[in-house]
Image (cartoon, grey):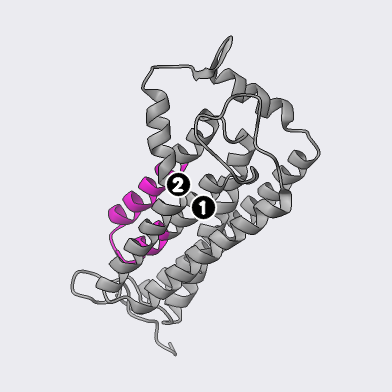
Amino acid sequence: MNALSRSRHWLFREQRVLALFLVSAALVAGFVALAGEMQEGETHAFDIAILEALRQPGHPAQLIGPGWLQQAATDITALGGVTVLSLVSVLAVAFLLLRKRWRQAGFTAIATMGGALIGSLLKGLFARPRPEVVPHLVEVTSLSFPSGHSLNSAIIYLTLAVMIARSFTDRTSRVFTVAVAVMLVLAIGCTRVLLGVHYPTDVLGGWTLGAAWALLVGIIADVLQKRHKIEEPTNGQGEAETPPLPNSP
């Protein structure tokens, strides 16, 4: 790769970081706006309408749709629980360690734990009670906004996808890794509303904040990789994706 090609590569990388930062900032702003509307009661009618629309008319304890839907929702929602997310996080860090990406593994562990801590603090801050308009189809004990399953699954799965994707140089592997994480996060969030344990705005809040956190982690990782503070993506021979730019023309 000649000097001009390397310069273009690094320019594109800087532009990508800026774009991701702007998207992350927009997601945080969206969460703040949503939280404000929720606290003022502006979202209440919307939340109630969605929850009631998902239950059989006259039988609020029964979901609309096929009989297997409730069991499927219960199984999928468990993927956003503390036990499963903790196990996934440990396995992902172990994967990075097996690839001898020591600093990236440490950064990933800090990023996932930090995001989960923020989620717990926000639940206590907003202190929104769980919805009571329809029966809960699974047992819950904590507060409602933002949805812990939605937030934590977004933080864990998206953050891990971003970090693991940074271990690959080929675009197909990166896109597939992130796409699987996104679909999983969306499915988990939807089950929380189906099961009647969260308002739709709880889930939207969890998604926006979790996605913002994952993007921020990706930005920081990109900067650290550029500065050789954590491992660069490698090809099959363990070589860096691109050679560093020379210090002078």
Mark 2 residue crowding within 10 angstroms, few (<14) / some (14–19) / many (20+): many
Is 13 on the left-hand or right-hand side of 142?
left
- The residue under label 1 is 152
Q: Where is residue 238 in the image (x, y as percent from the top left)?
A: 22, 76
Foreground: 26 or 71? 71
User: In the rendered image of this protein, does residue 169 appear above or below residue 227?
Assistant: above
Gap in Å between the C-alphas at discs 2 and 1?
A: 7 Å
Residue stretch in magenta: 160-185
- The residue under label 2 is 80
User: In the rendered image of this protein, does residue 54 appear above or below residue 220?
Assistant: above
Foreground: 63 or 247? 63
- The residue located at (52%, 59%) in the rendering is 215
| Amino acid carrying mark 2 in the image | Gly
Residue 8 visible, this angle: no
* Residue 173 counted in the magenta span: yes
Image quarter of the N terminus: bottom left
Q: Position of residue 165 (x, y in %)?
A: 35, 60
Q: Given contact means CB atoms under 8 Å apart, are the residues at marks 2 and 1 in contact?
A: yes
